[in-house]
Image (tube, grey):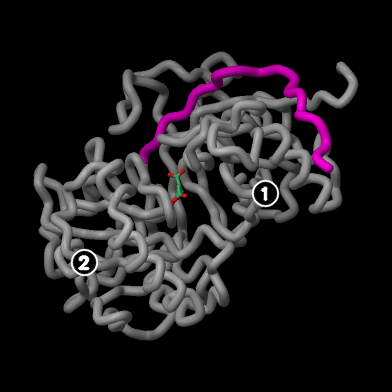
């Protein structure tokens, strides 16, 4: 290994892209690890020109894999968001898109053995303490990325990566509805503060004076809207047991409106300052769950499906999430279909230390 270089898998997971490392290849001390990851990604710099990050929060992500620390898991996965334009690395959120690459990466790097044509991988999501089960195509005992599955936001067809979550309610907030309410008013706007895998604030786009069909660029260019959304976010943080969220990437702020393409509802999500090109996996699960809550802003615009598949529309199509509901309509197990692909495997060379 060249001096200072680190083994790295660069993978697309769902509609995100990131660097996958073994924990044993990174410094143990958090400060040293974070400093190294910033230098690898090229942060802080809006262009990330001296690193491998893609100058977008969706392509400035890291998965750290290690042997399972729990009996009921095969591998541990810690997600880290490397900020693009700030010297910050945050473990205060999970990521369901990068999660899609964890099973393949764990098999590729020898943490999990392939078992037959399809290998189930139980992933301990260290950020939230919950378990996801991924099913990875492993014909002939090797990961295959080829297949016929298609997800909106990603061109082409790839091997399917079905993901199931037994229980992700209250993943970071301790309860599905951390305030106990389906609706809270913040800054004069009706909000659902919800966490079914991802802390989200769900609001009607119309209540913020927009249609909810605007492009990512149009919403990011609307300074007054962004200011209002951020004011609501900062107020929602403590209400959701997240404390001061000024330096955190949660809660996500999701604007909902009626469906335009046969789905359940339409979304635009601030994650939390840039607008997502699609929608996060756990954010989609959380918003779909919000749509089942009578009297909530999401329910007021949603067209609920008969079955378990909820198509959550986003700027480039829809994310399909599976929600199992009991006789009372309460949401239980959840899941989704993603794809993932190995893009590059090799050594990454961190930039120079910063003074
Ligand atoms: O909500 C981006 C992504 C995510 C998170 C973000 C995610 C999720 O799409 O599970 O996947 O919301 O910052 O990669």
Q: Nearer the viewer, residue 246 or 179?
A: 246
- Screen quadrant of the N terminus: top right
State the image quarter where residue 231 is shown: bottom left
Name the element at disc 2.
helix
Q: Nearer the viewer, residue 201 or 194?
A: 201
Q: Position of residue 164 (x, y in %)?
A: 44, 48
Q: State which tag comes first along the sequence, 1 or 2.
A: 1
- Residue drawn at x 21%, y 66% as measured from the top left: 208
Name the element at disc 1.
loop
The residue pinned by badge 1 equals 87
Say whether residue 159 is magenta: no
User: Where 224 sits versus 3, above or below?
Assistant: below
Residue 125 is left or right of residue 214, and the answer is: right
- Residue drawn at x 12%, y 63% as measured from the top left: 301
Distance, label 1 to label 2, CA atoms, is: 31 Å
Disc 1: CA contacts within 10 A as few (<14), some (14-19) or many (>=20): some
Taken as a whole, is the magenta stretch helix, strand or loop?
strand
Which disc is residue 238 wearing?
Answer: none
- Is residue 120 at all visible to an observer of this figure? no
Say whether residue 341 is magenta: yes
- Screen quadrant of the C terminus: top right
- Is residue 275 at all visible to an observer of this figure? yes
Q: Position of residue 350 (x, y in %)?
A: 76, 29
- Residue drawn at x 29%, y 74% as measured from the top left: 191
Q: Nearer the viewer, residue 30 or 309?
A: 30
Q: Position of residue 201 (x, y in %)?
A: 35, 68
User: Where 239 sits versus 151, above or below?
Assistant: below
- Residue drawn at x 29%, y 61% as measured from the top left: 225
Disc 2: CA contacts within 10 A as few (<14), some (14-19) or many (>=20): some
The residue pinned by badge 2 equals 208
**Range covered by the magenta-colored residues:** 337-355
């Amino acid at each position: 290994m060249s001096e200072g270089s680190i083994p790295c898998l660069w993978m697309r997971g769902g509609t995100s892209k990131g660097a996958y490392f073994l924990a044993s290849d990174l410094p143990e001390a958090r400060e040293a690890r974070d400093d190294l990851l910033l230098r690898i990604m090229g942060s802080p710099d809006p262009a990330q020109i001296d690193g491998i990050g893609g100058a977008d929060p969706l392509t400035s992500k890291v998965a750290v894999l290690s042997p399972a620390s729990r009996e009921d898991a095969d591998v541990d996965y810690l997600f880290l968001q490397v900020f693009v334009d700030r010297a910050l690395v945050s473990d205060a959120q999970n990521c369901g898109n990068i999660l899609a690459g964890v099973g393949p990466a764990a098999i590729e790097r020898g943490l999990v053995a392939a078992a037959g044509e399809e290998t189930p991988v139980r992933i301990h999501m260290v950020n939230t303490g919950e378990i996801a089960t991924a099913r990875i195509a492993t014909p002939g005992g090797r990961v295959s990325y080829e297949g016929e599955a298609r997800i909106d936001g990603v061109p082409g067809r790839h091997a399917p990566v079905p993901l199931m979550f037994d229980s992700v309610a209250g993943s970071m907030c301790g309860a599905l509805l951390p305030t106990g309410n389906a609706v809270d008013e913040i800054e004069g706007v009706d909000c659902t503060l919800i966490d079914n895998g991802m802390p989200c604030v769900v609001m009607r786009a119309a209540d913020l004076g927009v249609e909810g069909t605007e492009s990512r660029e149009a919403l990011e260019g609307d300074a007054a809207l962004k200011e209002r959304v951020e004011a609501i976010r900062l107020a929602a943080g403590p209400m959701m047991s997240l404390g001061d969220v000024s330096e955190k990437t949660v809660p996500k702020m999701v604007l909902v409106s009626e469906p335009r393409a046969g789905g359940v509802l339409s979304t635009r999500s601030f994650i939390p300052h840039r607008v997502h090109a699609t929608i996060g996996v756990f954010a989609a699960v959380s918003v779909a769950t919000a749509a089942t809550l009578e009297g909530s802003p999401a329910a007021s615009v949603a067209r609920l499906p008969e079955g378990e598949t909820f198509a959550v529309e986003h700027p480039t199509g829809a994310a399909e999430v599976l929600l199992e509901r009991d006789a009372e309509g309460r949401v239980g197990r959840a899941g989704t279909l993603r794809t993932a692909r190995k893009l590059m495997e090799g050594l990454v060379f961190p930039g120079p230390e910063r003074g």
